[in-house]
Image (spheres, helix red, strand yellow):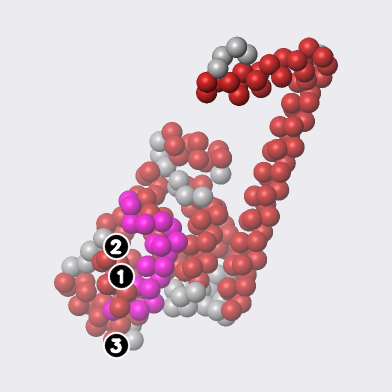
Amino acid sequence: IAAVQGPLGPVAGRITSLGTIIGQVGLKVALFTVGIAAMTFALRAITKTTMRAETQFLKLQAILKATGSAAGLTALDIENLSRAIGVGTLASTQKVRDAAGMLLTFKSIAGDTFREALALTQDLAAVGFGDLKMGAMQLGKALEEPIVGLGALRRVGVSFTEDQKAMIKVLDMTGRKQEAQEIILKALNEQVGGAGVNAAKGLAGAVDSVVE
């Protein structure tokens, strides 16, 4: 193998070196060394993931404080929701947390509306309407300012009937924003609802859940 040239040259060199090490120190010692190296690598990966999650959690707490907890949810509520979406879809929990942080900046999105909107950001991403963060921004704008935000959703491919647009406009102008938000969410559910969960039902979803 060491004689192989071209693209396999570096690989052959490593195999030769490994053979030399095993010959010098013995198979058991070599395997023990490899095990320690693998464990060290795994611990570093776990530590890095934990630090990143902690940083995101602290960021969520800061946004909640800045917005006066307008969403009506705690950081732990949002963390549990992010994890549930991350496990149930092909999205990473990290990206869902980022999307949640984006949605939190829109103060009129609260309670069940927030929960449904966060899930829909992954549905939008699953069918090709940008990534989670973009979906959160577009959907957040539409829910915060329904009349203006509908244009943003239409530009990324989400359609509304003329009756829906007229009803949303009337509700928003008469101070019934929550009802306008419900129509927007209903329209989105009819077009992309459940796409994120369905995409995770196959082998890719099973592997993603294990990694998650």
Indicate whether 45 appears above or below 52: above
Q: Gap in Å between the C-alphas at discs 1 and 3?
A: 22 Å
Numbered badge on residue 174 = 3
Q: Nearer the viewer, residue 19 or 199?
A: 19
Residue 40 in picture, x, y percent from top left: 75, 37
Numbered badge on residue 152 = 1
The residue beneath circle 2 is: 156
Q: Amino acid at mark 2?
A: Val
Q: How many marks?
A: 3
Q: Quadrant of the N terminus?
A: top right
Q: Is residue 81 visible?
A: no
The residue that appears at 56% across and 76% down in the rendered structure is 69
Q: Gap in Å between the C-alphas at discs 3 and 2?
A: 27 Å
Indicate whether 30 appears above or below 61: above
Q: Is residue 17 left or right of residue 157?
A: right
Foreground mark, 3 or 2, reads 2
Sooner in the amino-acid sequence: mark 3 or mark 2 = 2
Q: Gap in Å between the C-alphas at discs 2 and 1?
A: 7 Å
Q: Is residue 161 left or right of residue 131?
A: left
As helix, strand or loop, the secondary structure at mark 1 comes to helix
Q: Amino acid at mark 3?
A: Thr
The reply to whether dot 2 and dot 1 touch (C-beta < 8 Å) is: yes
Indicate whether 78 appears above or below 90: below
Give the class, few, some or many, for how many residues have Cα within 10 Å of label 3's Cα (few <14, many ≥20): few
Residue stretch in magenta: 127-147
